[in-house]
Amino acid sequence: MKTPKSRILYERARKVLPAGVSYAIRHFDPYPFYVARAKGGKLYDVDGNEYVDFWLGHTTHILGHSPPAVIKAVREQLEKGIHYGTAHELEIALAEQVTKMMPSAEMVRFTNSGTEANMYAVRLARAYTGRVKIAKFEGGWHGGYDALHKAVKPPYDLPESAGLTLGALDDTLVLPFNDIEGVKERLKGVEDKVAAVIIEPVLGAGGAIPVEKEFLRELREFCDQHGILLIVDEVITGFRLAPGGVQQYFGVRPDLTVLGKNFRRGLSSRRLLRPG
């Protein structure tokens, strides 16, 4: 496969984009291929090469690229306006639909990114419980928020990035995935200081490892015993594992849920869900 036009674009990109890309995961040696268009389950690059797309826009396109019904709806809305900056009926209708589908959702807060939604979930948990500590799992990815940008990849005891404050890192505890005894051991003696445990039911950046049903149920019970909120980051699993996400599939109801990506079809918006 030849990609001379992609190489030229990459050389151009390196002059204005760090590492030549706008997101680190898109970089690979010797250079990324550049997409010209997409349809269904296929990508077509600027050199005319065709690819079967298993990535589907970071898992966004559960209906495939450019489904006619979605294209039609977007075009119709473009004629009416894009960003009103004020209240409108569609946000109510969308929130109503989400509350019908997601077992834990009684209220919905729309945000601009998964990072932002997780940040608000953590802040809400701290405000509600009056506690400071947050616990996350090894291999879990919850965006670029300092308090959660820890233990995404091995070695788990090192910061994921420069520029993270010691305060943010010290207030985040790291737990072993699918190991309830390990969770209990690491939180022993500090249970009353933990505001929330946040979990990805499938470790999107940690090898696509799925959560075990019994572990999730035991984690729910452990959190209840100690007054700890359970935050489920369903950015990957929401509407995919089941219409109501992993919480419907396994019958485990979280206190807070984060959704995104496949919900929005590649358009801006994430959401934070909580019980009323």
Image: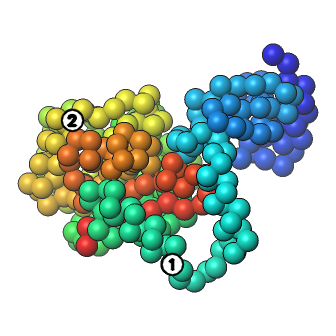
Closest to the observer, 232 or 194:
232
Residue type marked 1: Glu
The quadrant the C terminus occupies is bottom left
Query: Residue 89 shows which numbered tag?
Result: 1
Q: Is mark 2 on a helix, strand or loop?
A: helix
Q: Is residue 221 left or right of residue 145?
A: left
Compute the Cα span from label 2 to label 1.
Answer: 38 Å
Closest to the observer, 188 or 71:
71
Asked if 211 appears above or below 111 in the picture, the reply is above
**Residue visible at 65% across and 74% down?**
83
**Residue visible at 71% across and 62% down?**
75
Q: Is mark 1 on a helix, strand or loop?
A: helix
**Residue visible at 78% across and 47% down?**
17
Image coordinates of residue 112 in percent, x first then y, are 55, 64
Tell us which disc is closer to us: 2 or 1. Answer: 1
Callout 1 crowding tier (Cα within 10 Å): few <14, some 14–19, many ≥20: few
Residue type marked 2: Lys
Image coordinates of residue 212 in percent, x first then y, are 24, 32
**Residue visible at 90% across and 25% down?**
4
According to the image, label 2 marks what residue? 213
- View extreme (left): residue: 225
Image coordinates of residue 136 in percent, x first then y, are 33, 46
Closest to the observer, 152 or 39:
39
Q: Quadrant of residue 122?
A: bottom left
